[in-house]
Image (cartoon, rainbow, N blue to C red):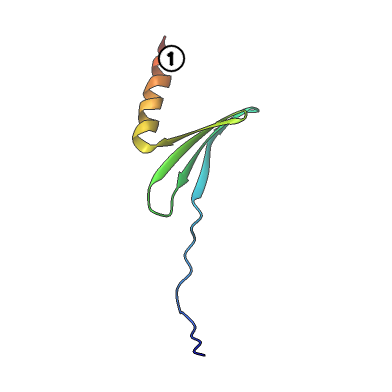
């Protein structure tokens, strides 16, 4: 039998997260993914909505419109 040990550097596959805002029932947070992409997440009670960067920007535009209305 032949045995060998592979040498490789372990890299974290965990995203770096940051809470953007939080209330008793809701939370918005951002994740810097290992591949360099940023995703945004809204937790609304038992529902979580996931956004890519462009979708998040559009969502913020929608919220700004709601606040003006």
Q: Quadrant of the C terminus?
A: top left
- Residue at 36% over, 30% down: 57
How many numbered tags mark residues here?
A: 1
Asked whether, in this view, residue 57 is left or right of residue 6, the answer is left
SS class, disc 1: helix
Q: Provide the residue designation for mark 1.
A: 66
Q: Position of residue 12 (x, y in %)?
A: 49, 61
Q: Is residue 52 above or below residue 3?
A: above
Residue at x 40% of width, y 32% of height? 56
Q: On screen, 23 above or below 12?
A: above
Mark 1 crowdedness (10 Å alpha carbons): few <14, some 14-19, many ≥20: few
* Picture quadrant of residue 39: top left
Residue nearest the observer in this picture, 54 or 20: 54
Q: Residue furthest bottom?
A: 1
**Residue in front for this viewpoint, 18 or 37:** 37
Percent coordinates x, y for residue 23 in the rendering: 61, 28
Furthest-left residue in view?
54
Residue 48 spot, x, y in % from top left: 54, 33
Measuring 38% from the left and 47% from the top, which residue is drawn there? Answer: 37
Check the image and name the residue furthest to the top: 69
Residue sitting at the far right: 24
Q: Is residue 23 left or right of residue 42?
A: right
Image x and y of residue 65, in percent? 39, 16
């Amino acid at each position: 039998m032949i045995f060998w040990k592979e040498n490789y550097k372990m890299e974290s596959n965990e995203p770096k997260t940051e809470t953007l805002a939080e209330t008793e029932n809701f939370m918005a947070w951002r994740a810097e993914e290992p591949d360099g992409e940023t995703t945004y997440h809204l937790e609304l009670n038992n529902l979580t909505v996931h956004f890519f960067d462009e979708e998040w920007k559009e969502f913020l535009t929608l919220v700004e419109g709601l606040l003006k209305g």
